[in-house]
Structures are given as structure tokens and as C-alpha cells.
Image (tube, rainbow, N blue to C red):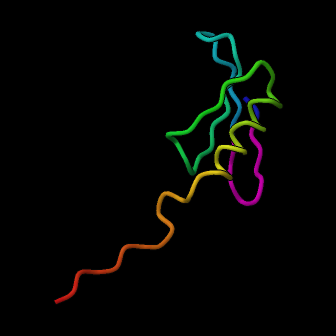
Amino acid sequence: MRVSVVDGLTYRVLWSPECLLYRGLCDCEPALSWQADTEDEALDGIRRQVRGRAPSHPNPPEPPLG
């Protein structure tokens, strides 16, 4: 497993024996992943996906009124 911290986000690249590919993951976006032939391609792919996605919770929810 390869772990990289970029811009304060933790990314992991794991080997998937089921798919015979590397799988890139980001701790802050567990629903996203990227599969590729190499570790570098998997890391680059998941970073592009995360950058292109709006934050899941851009602002904290406001408390109910009343």
C-alpha cells in the first residue's frame, strides 16, 4: 500500500488482486476510487477525481431556528 498526503488530503493506492489493477482512494471521499495499471496512474486519477468534485459538505449545517 502506498500512502500520499497532498494538499492536506490523504490518498491511498492499493493492489486489487480481484481486478489485477491498482486502486486509488481518498480518505475524504470514500465513495470515489480510480483503477489503473500503475500506482502512479491510480494516484493521478483519484487526485483528478477529487479536484473535480465539489466538497461533500462545503459548509457546516446551520442549527434549526426556534
Q: Which of these two is toward me, 4 or 49?
A: 49
Please give left or right for residue 9 compared with residue 55 in the image: right
Q: Residue furthest left?
A: 66
Name which residue lies at 47% across and 63% down. 57
**Residue 44 x %, y %:** 78, 38
Rendered-image quadrant of the N terminus? top right
The quarter of the picture where residue 26 lies is: top right
Q: How many marks?
A: 0
| Whether residue 55 is situated above or below residue 23 in the rendered picture | below
Q: Magenta stretch mostly in which secondary structure?
A: strand
Q: Residue furthest bottom?
A: 66
Q: Is residue 7 magenta?
A: yes
Q: Which of these two is toward me, 2 or 35?
A: 35
**Residue 63 x %, y %:** 29, 81
The quarter of the picture where residue 41 lies is: top right
Q: Which residues are magenta?
A: 3-11
